[in-house]
Image (tube, grey):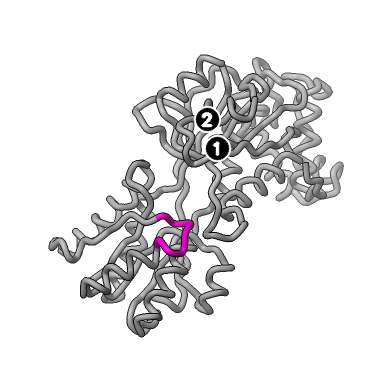
């Protein structure tokens, strides 16, 4: 695990967390005041409040108005060093020997917060052709029981949920499940993200917008298309030629180029593109340029996600819908730690809002 110097907020939280976990500060004990803690740890009261807020989120303390802060760890199950893993489908970006940057953001968050919660961080990858995590675990001789908690960066099927619940594993998903099962998950608000992206273009006067998105076999992409269409409905754009959206593999440059090439060869007119995937964006813009079209002079451009390397290659500052994966993994870990420390805790569902980064291409 990467060792990283803790900032004062993390240090305060970690030391209080460990003191409560090992019983040094017993259940029911009253904590020192914010001012006393600030003096004890050499930090500001703002830092103290932030650390206490994290402990409160984990249900380890409770605040009594006018009477102080008390440890409330009764019923909390603490264990030794935990083994936590992220399970994600392996994707190679483009034809380069480069892992999709999404993996980097997930692992960066997992490693960083390992300093706070004291766990061993692991990444388990699935091949795109594998139908379930059980298949990937079998190929790699991984036992489900080896992990105290798992975070799934994929859409879980009913079969996978059955395996996890049958094995009594604690887990959180970063997407809603494929079916209607009740599980804990934290996901990006895909509907509102696509809706806001489309509204942004519509409000700037674009009326022939084409959306290139990932497979509609996944709920998250269906939600994006629904958000796209909702924005068009509000502007009374109802004809088929005004509601064009196509599937495109986001990690391969040629996929984005192929869709744009087909549209241009068929003589279809469009004045704006929303492209899911940085590499597909690179292909789409390259194809536009080969046809003598420039962004944003001839076609406006908005992309998911916000990968700087692609923008550098395009020599454009691209308007992007940034998906806050770092925040997503932070909240997922908090939910998972709550599950581990509080058995039988109710399911948690949380939406995180993406960020529209407006730049020169719109």
Residue 270: assigned label? none
Residue drawn 61% across and 22% down? 144
Q: Say which quarter of the image contains residue 207.
A: bottom left
Q: Secondary structure at mark 2?
A: helix
Q: Is residue 220 above or below residue 201?
A: above
Residue reaching furthest to the left? 239
Residue at left 34%, top 51%? 224
* Residue 80, above or below 65: above
Residue 196 is one of the magenta-drawn residues: no
- Does 209 sit left or right of 82 as displayed? left
**Looking at the picture, how far across and down is residue 342, in whole percent?**
61, 21
The span picked out in magenta is 249-255
Rendered-image quadrant of the N terminus: top right
| Residue 203, percent from left and from top | 29, 71
- Residue position marked by numbered label 1 in the rendering: 126
Q: Residue at x 53, y 21 (%)?
A: 345
Residue contact at pointers 2 and 1, CB within 8 angstroms:
yes
Mark 2 vs 1, N-terminal side: 1
Tell me: residue 135, above or below residue 283: above
Depth order, front residue of 126/67: 126
Point out residue 231 in the picture as x, y percentages from the top left corner. Answer: 26, 59
Q: Which mark is residue 133?
A: 2
């Amino acid at each position: 695990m990467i060792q990283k110097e803790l900032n004062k907020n993390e240090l305060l939280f970690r030391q209080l967390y460990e003191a409560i976990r090992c019983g040094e500060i017993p259940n029911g004990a009253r904590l020192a005041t914010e001012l006393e803690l600030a003096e004890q740890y050499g930090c500001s009261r703002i830092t103290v409040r932030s650390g206490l807020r994290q402990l409160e989120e984990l249900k380890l303390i409770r605040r009594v108005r006018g009477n102080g802060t008390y440890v409330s760890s009764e019923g909390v199950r603490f264990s030794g060093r935990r083994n936590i893993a992220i399970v994600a489908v392996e994707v190679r970006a483009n034809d380069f020997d480069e892992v999709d940057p999404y993996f980097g953001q997930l692992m960066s968050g997992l490693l960083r917060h390992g300093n706070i919660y004291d766990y061993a961080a692991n990444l388990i990858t699935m091949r795109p052709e594998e139908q379930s995590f059980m298949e990937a675990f079998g190929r790699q001789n991984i036992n489900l029981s080896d992990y105290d908690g798992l975070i799934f960066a994929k859409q879980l099927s009913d079969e996978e949920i059955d395996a996890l619940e049958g094995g009594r594993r604690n887990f959180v998903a970063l997407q809603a499940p494929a079916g209607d099962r009740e599980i804990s998950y934290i996901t990006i608000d895909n509907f509102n993200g696509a809706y806001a992206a489309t509204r942004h273009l519509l409000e700037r006067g674009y009326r022939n917008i084409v959306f290139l998105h990932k497979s509609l076999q996944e709920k998250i992409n269906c939600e994006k298309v629904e958000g796209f269409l909702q924005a068009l409905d509000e502007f009374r754009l109802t004809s088929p030629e005004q509601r064009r959206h196509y599937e495109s593999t986001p990690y391969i440059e040629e996929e984005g180029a192929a869709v744009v090439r087909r549209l241009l060869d068929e003589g279809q007119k469009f004045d704006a593109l929303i492209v899911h995937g940085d590499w597909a964006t690179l292909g789409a813009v390259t194809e536009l340029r080969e046809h003598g079209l420039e962004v944003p002079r001839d076609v406006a451009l908005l992309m998911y996600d916000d990968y700087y390397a692609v923008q550098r290659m395009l020599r454009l500052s691209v308007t992007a819908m940034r998906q806050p994966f770092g925040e997503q993994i932070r909240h997922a870990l908090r939910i998972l730690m709550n599950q581990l420390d509080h058995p039988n805790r109710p399911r948690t569902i949380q939406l995180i809002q993406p960020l529209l980064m407006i730049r020169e291409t719109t």
